[in-house]
Image (cartoon, rainbow, N blue to C red):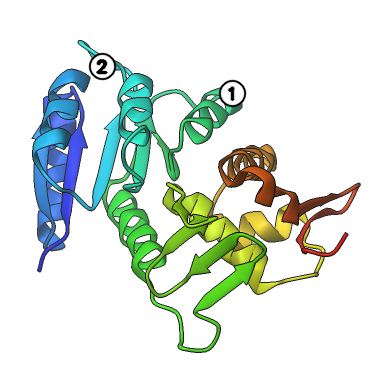
Amino acid sequence: MNRKILLVEDDMLMREFITDYFKKERWDVYEAENGRAGLELFEQISVDLVVLDIMMPEMDGWSVCRRIREKSAVPIIIITARSEDDDQLMGFELGADEYVTKPLSPRVLVARATALMKRTEGTMGQDGDRLSYGNLMVNRLAHTVTVAGMAINLSPKEYELLVFLTKHYGKVLSREYILDAVWGYDYYGDLRTVDTHVKKLRAKLGDEGRYIRTVIRAGYKFETEA
C-alpha cells in the first residue's frame, strides 16, 4: 500500500514540482493551497506524513502545525524560505520532525521523508520490546508510550528520542551524539534542538520525566535510580 502525504504549499509550481517527485516514489499525494484548506483536508483523510509550508494565506504553517499536534502525532516536515535558528526552534517546539529551507531539492525532500518514515515505522526485535520504568511503559513493537496506564501522545521525534535514551540506559549521552543519532548526520540544526525536545518530552511524561536526567556540561542520561 502506498504511503499518503498531505502537501500544504501555496506556490502552485512548487506544489506541482514536489508532487511529481513524490508520485514517482509511489506516494499518494493530497494537495492544499493554503493552511485552512490543509487543515480541513487533514481532518478528512488519514495520512502518513504532512509536508507543510510556513508562509501561507488563510492560516500560516505555525498555526496548522499547532492544530495538528493537538490531536495527532503524524510526522511533519516544515518547509520555509526562512533559515533563522529561532524559526527552526519554533517549528520543533510546535512538534515538527524535520525542517527544510528553500530553495529545496524535491529529490532531497523525498529522501528525507522516506528516511523519516522508516525511522517512524521501523520495528524493533523481540528482545526488550516492552520496557517499564516506574509508571512509564514503552512498547517498542506497538510504538506506544503510557504513564500509569494513560496513553501519551508523542510526536515521532519525541518517541525516537525516548527510545534512544532508554536503549542507552544509565549512559551519559552528549547533545552532539543525540543529535547525530536521532536527527541524522546530515542535519544542520542547532544543539538547542535536543534541549527543546527533552523539555517537551519531560513535560509530556509528567513525574516520569524525571528519569531523563541532565548531566551538567555533558548531556543527558536515562536512569531511574536517584
Which image quarter is the C terminus in? bottom right
Residue depicted at x 91% and y 47%: 216
Tell me the tag on residue 26.
none
Residue 103 visible in the shown view: no
Q: CA distance from mark 1 to mark 2?
A: 19 Å
Residue type highlighted by circle 2? Met
* Residue type at numbered disc 1: Asp
How far across and how far down the image is residue 145, in percent? 48, 59
Q: Nearer the viewer, residue 64 or 170?
A: 170
Q: Position of residue 37 (x, y in %)?
A: 12, 23
- Specify which label sits upstream in the sequence, 1 or 2: 2
The residue beneath circle 1 is 86
Query: Residue 149: percent from the left, percent from the top?
Result: 48, 57
Residue 215 as seen in the image, left or right of residue 3: right
Relative side of 132 to 7, left or right: right
Q: Alpha-carbon neighbours of circle 1 within 10 Å: few (<14), some, or many (≥20)? A: few
Is residue 121 in view? Answer: yes
Residue 82 versus residue 224 in the image, above or below:
above
The answer to whether residue 158 is left or right of residue 54 is right
Q: Report the residue that reaches farthest toward the top.
A: 58
Residue 157 is situated, as x and y percent measured from the top left of the image, at: 49, 51
Q: Quadrant of residue 119?
A: bottom left
Q: Which residue is mark 2?
A: 56
Q: Secondary structure at mark 1?
A: helix
Q: Which quadrant does the N terminus fall into? A: bottom left
Decide if residue 11 is on the left or right side of residue 191. Answer: left
| Residue at figure coordinates x 19%, y 38% from the top left | 7
Instruction: Judge whether 136 appears above or below 197 on screen.
Output: below
